[in-house]
Image: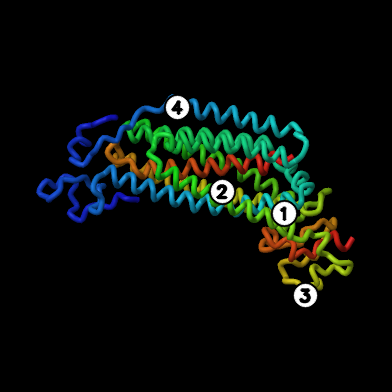
């Protein structure tokens, strides 16, 4: 650590802050991140049996990269622990959020299952649907692109007057 | 940040009951305690950012699980090379940011400035590349929701992918722009000579933020550009 004159004069409260030169750790971290990025791109060219497995491999590599960033660039490796506890508890709750929502995925209706012959979705006739889920006037190729910003995140089962039902 | 001047106004006011530096606020015992408290506050903010993005990631996973063909087909419209270049740009910027923090902590003002300028430039590079990607998609009509008007062959549901693409990269891009604004402010303050080993909290906290934004991109890149 460096005590310059003006700093030393500044304060009797100026405690030891133990700043060491970590450059070599940072260089190693960025090198590892580059290698892992290359591995991510490489792994995406290979088909590992199913999309799910590919996705899990990509997420696992991303998690290794994120861990390196958190440990070295964000200094968690050199800290006492409170910040790490805060960080990890948020990851835990993200996990709860994801797992419990995915347990529910089977209860969600697909576009195909919810759309009846007459184009109604889950009992709602096309003309009674909110404006933002209605199909646009120029339904060019007939692809499904009827939903507005509000409908596509979670409520996919409830709100799908999709184009493909009419074809 | 936590650099509000003391009511007495004097950093070197030796007549004052306590002889403490300008940056140290009264309710903290020491500069170190103030630094640790600021850091914890920043981590709590980062947690809210993680939770914000986790909702988007969850929406992405749900939609992808329901429309796998549409997502695979849609992601072919993304330029993998541009995504990879942006990943590398952001990783390097994280490295220069952490070097800026370390330089500030070691009172190496010139190096701090140099690293901050490079970080700002890399953030700008990221946004320029993002701009060209966006323009290309807007031109092709590869847009969210009912704005989707792509004329070529496509799989039903591709608009869902582009909804997630624009929302996720858009919010991420806003974070990059905000970070660039803060880094520009840090450059201004560093030029004024406000940061040294005694006090560099704003540089440190901005570093944490910048790394989190990088960390989110680490997940976005494979999810959006490398779906197959």
Residue A121 shown left or right of residue B98 in the figure: right
Where disc 3 sits, the SS reads helix
* Quadrant (top left/top right/bottom left/bottom right) for the C terminus of chain B: top right
Q: Residue at horizontal 75%, vertical 52%?
A: B66
Say whether mark 1 and mark 4 are on the same chain: no
Looking at the image, which residue is at 43% across and 38% down? Answer: A76
Pick whichever, B138 or A46, lies toward us: A46
Say whether residue B136 is visible.
yes
* Total numbered circles: 4
**Residue in the picture at 24% in, 45% down:** B30
Q: Disc 4 designates what residue? A: A25
Badges 2 and 4: C-beta atoms under 8 Å apart? no
Q: Could you tell which of marks 2 and 1 lies nearer the N-terminus?
A: 1
Mark 3 and mark 4 lie on one chain; the one further toward the N terminus is 4
Horizontal side, residue B3 vs residue B186: left or right? left
- Cα separation between marks 3 and 2: 36 Å
Label 2 secondary element: helix
Question: Circle 1 sits on which residue?
Answer: B160
Mark identifier at residue A128? 3
């Amino acid at each position: 650590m460096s005590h310059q004159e003006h700093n030393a004069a500044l304060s009797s409260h100026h405690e030891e802050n133990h700043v060491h030169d970590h450059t070599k750790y940072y260089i190693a971290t960025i090198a590892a991140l580059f290698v892992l990025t290359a591995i991510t791109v490489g792994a995406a060219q290979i088909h590992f049996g199913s999309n799910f497995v590919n996705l899990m491999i990509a997420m696992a590599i991303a998690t290794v990269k994120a861990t390196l960033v958190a440990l070295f660039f964000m200094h968690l490796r050199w800290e006492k622990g409170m910040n790490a506890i805060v960080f990890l508890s948020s990851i835990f709750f993200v996990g709860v959020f994801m797992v419990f929502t995915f347990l529910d995925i089977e209860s969600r209706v697909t576009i195909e299952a919810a759309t009846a012959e007459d184009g109604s979705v889950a009992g709602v006739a096309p003309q009674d649907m909110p404006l933002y889920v209605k199909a646009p006037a120029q339904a060019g190729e007939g692809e499904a692109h009827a939903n507005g910003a509000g409908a596509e995140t979670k409520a996919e089962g409830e709100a799908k007057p999709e184009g493909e039902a009419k074809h | 940040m936590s650099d509000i001047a003391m009511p007495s106004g004097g950093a070197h006011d030796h007549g004052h009951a306590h002889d403490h530096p300008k940056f140290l606020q009264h309710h903290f015992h020491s500069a170190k305690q103030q630094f640790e408290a600021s850091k914890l506050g920043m981590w709590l903010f980062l947690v809210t950012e993680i939770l914000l993005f986790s909702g988007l990631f969850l929406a992405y996973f749900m939609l992808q699980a329901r429309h796998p063909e549409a997502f695979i087909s849609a992601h072919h419209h993304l330029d993998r090379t541009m995504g990879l270049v942006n990943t590398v740009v952001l990783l390097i910027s994280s490295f220069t940011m952490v070097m800026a923090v370390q330089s500030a902590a070691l009172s190496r003002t010139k190096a701090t400035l140099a690293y901050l300028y490079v970080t700002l430039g890399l953030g700008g590079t990221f946004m320029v590349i993002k701009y060209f990607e966006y323009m290309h998609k807007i031109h092709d009509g590869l847009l969210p929701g009912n704005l989707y008007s792509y004329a070529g062959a496509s799989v039903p549901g591709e608009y869902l992918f582009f909804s997630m693409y624009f929302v996720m990269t858009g919010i991420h891009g806003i974070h990059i722009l905000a970070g660039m604004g803060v880094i520009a402010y840090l450059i201004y303050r560093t030029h004024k000579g406000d940061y040294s080993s005694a006090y560099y909290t704003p540089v440190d906290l901005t570093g944490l933020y910048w790394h989190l934004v990088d960390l989110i991109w680490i997940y976005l890149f494979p999810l959006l550009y490398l779906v197959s």
